[in-house]
Image (tube, helix red, strand yellow):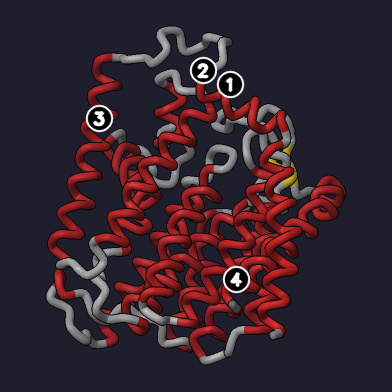
């Protein structure tokens, strides 16, 4: 019951905060301007991350017990939010941004003792701090930046992370890990509240504050669940749960290095850029990435108790298939729908637009909340 309450409160707070934050965004210079490597053509407020963080933190502070791991989680989120908001207000050098992430991860590792100690596939079983600490830093910094870099289309980072956290919530529920369940449902609620304003065409962006917040919290929760909550879960399973943005980042950085450029250079080589370049429209690109993410998350849940070797093999197979597919499409210069500049909306796009214009989603969402919330309160009281 408390997990459901966390979800509702986080969603409500996020939705309530976004509108006034959007109005203040111009005055505060929290606006993402159009640029060559971006797909939007008008300035968009990027205050969604602030609203999501507030929506998540509030129920966690009020209703979740505060063992040292949760305190470290909150402190780390605070650091991520400070540097993220700073970056959204005035773009930071990547080294300053990286420093903020290192501080946040350091709090989680050294204060919260949130570390990766057991990875059987690497021959690590209760590994010493000299091994587990660098490994944890690498993992948390990696997933934080992977989700940050994958935030390139309306609804993309929010939707894919929602699937990952939803899978994590289900695993926490099945493992009876109350702490991870309550933290993850609060994040889920805030993401749903944000997506109400972020689906294409977006009214608001999450900004660096939001994408780093989602990446950092996802990594922390995965470690808590697999290393502390239920050690029987495969430590390699998170590769399936969070692996799509990791794969995307790996492909992009490898391509930059191969071309003799900095791995941190800006370009249009992410998976969503590649889908757009071969002719898919915005809706289609997002739906295809959602589908791939759904496959990986389903695999993570289904194969959670299988060997690390199998989980690694599944992820390696998915990664290899993705790399080969895009390499082949680039080689043959294939284009979907023929003319990539065709103004005719596809069937999928027309269907989604009609659904949004009908107001059915808004109507049934309001109906659900107006019925479910009072019923929930009655059952919670009695």
**Which-is-in-front pick, marks 4 and 3?**
4
Q: Nearer the viewer, residue 233 or 239?
A: 233
**Which-is-in-front pick, marks 1 and 3?**
1
Measuring from the top left, give residue 230's x and y in whole percent: 32, 81
Q: Secondary structure at mark 1?
A: helix
Q: Residue at x 35, y 74 (%)?
A: 136
Residue 237 appears in the figure: yes
Measuring from the top left, give residue 189's x and y in whole percent: 62, 62
Which numbered disc flags the more N-terminal residue, 2 or 4? 4
Q: Is residue 363 above or below residue 274?
A: below
The label on residue 346 is: 2
Q: Secondary structure at mark 3?
A: helix
Which numbered disc flags the more N-terminal residue, 3 or 2? 3
Measuring from the top left, give residue 196's x and y in whole percent: 68, 47
Q: Is the C-beta separation of discs 3 and 2 under 8 Å?
A: no
Question: Disc 2 and disc 1: Cα gap in Å?
Answer: 6 Å
Which residue is the site of mark 4? Answer: 4
Residue 82 appears in the figure: no
């Amino acid at each position: 019951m408390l997990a459901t309450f966390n979800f509702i409160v986080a969603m409500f707070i996020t939705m309530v905060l976004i509108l006034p934050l959007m109005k203040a965004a111009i005055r505060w210079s929290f606006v993402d301007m159009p640029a060559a490597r971006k797909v939007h053509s008008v300035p968009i407020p990027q205050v969604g991350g602030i609203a999501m963080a507030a929506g998540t933190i509030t129920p966690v502070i009020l209703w979740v017990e505060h063992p040292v791991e949760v305190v470290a989680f909150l402190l780390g989120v605070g650091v991520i939010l400070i540097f993220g908001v700073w970056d959204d207000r005035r773009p930071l050098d990547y080294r300053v941004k990286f420093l903020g992430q290192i501080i946040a991860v350091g709090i989680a590792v050294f204060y919260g003792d949130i570390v990766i100690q057991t990875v059987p596939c690497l021959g690590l079983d209760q590994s010493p701090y000299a091994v587990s600490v660098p490994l944890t830093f690498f993992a948390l910094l990696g997933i934080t930046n992977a989700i940050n870099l994958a935030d390139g289309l309306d609804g993309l980072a929010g939707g894919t992370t929602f699937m990952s956290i939803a899978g994590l919530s289900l695993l926490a529920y099945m493992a009876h890990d109350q702490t991870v369940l309550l933290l993850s449902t609060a994040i889920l609620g805030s993401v749903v509240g944000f997506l109400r304003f972020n689906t294409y065409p977006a009214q608001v962006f999450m900004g660096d504050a939001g994408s780093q917040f989602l990446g950092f919290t996802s990594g922390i929760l995965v470690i808590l669940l697999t290393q502390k909550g239920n050690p029987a879960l495969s430590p390699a399973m998170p590769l399936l749960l969070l692996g799509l943005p990791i794969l995307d980042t790996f492909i992009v950085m490898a391509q930059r290095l191969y071309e003799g450029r900095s791995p941190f250079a800006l370009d249009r080589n992410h998976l969503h850029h590649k889908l757009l370049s071969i002719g898919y429209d915005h809706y289609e690109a997002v739906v295809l990435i959602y589908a791939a993410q759904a496959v990986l998350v389903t695999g993570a849940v289904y194969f959670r108790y299988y060997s690390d070797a199998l989980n690694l093999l599944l992820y390696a197979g998915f990664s290899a298939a993705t790399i080969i597919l895009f390499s082949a499409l680039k080689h043959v210069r294939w284009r979907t729908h023929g003319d990539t500049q065709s103004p005719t909306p596809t069937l999928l796009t027309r269907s989604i637009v009609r659904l949004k214009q009908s107001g059915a989603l808004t109507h049934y969402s309001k109906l659900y909340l107006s019925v479910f919330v009072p019923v929930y309160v009655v059952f919670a009281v009695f």
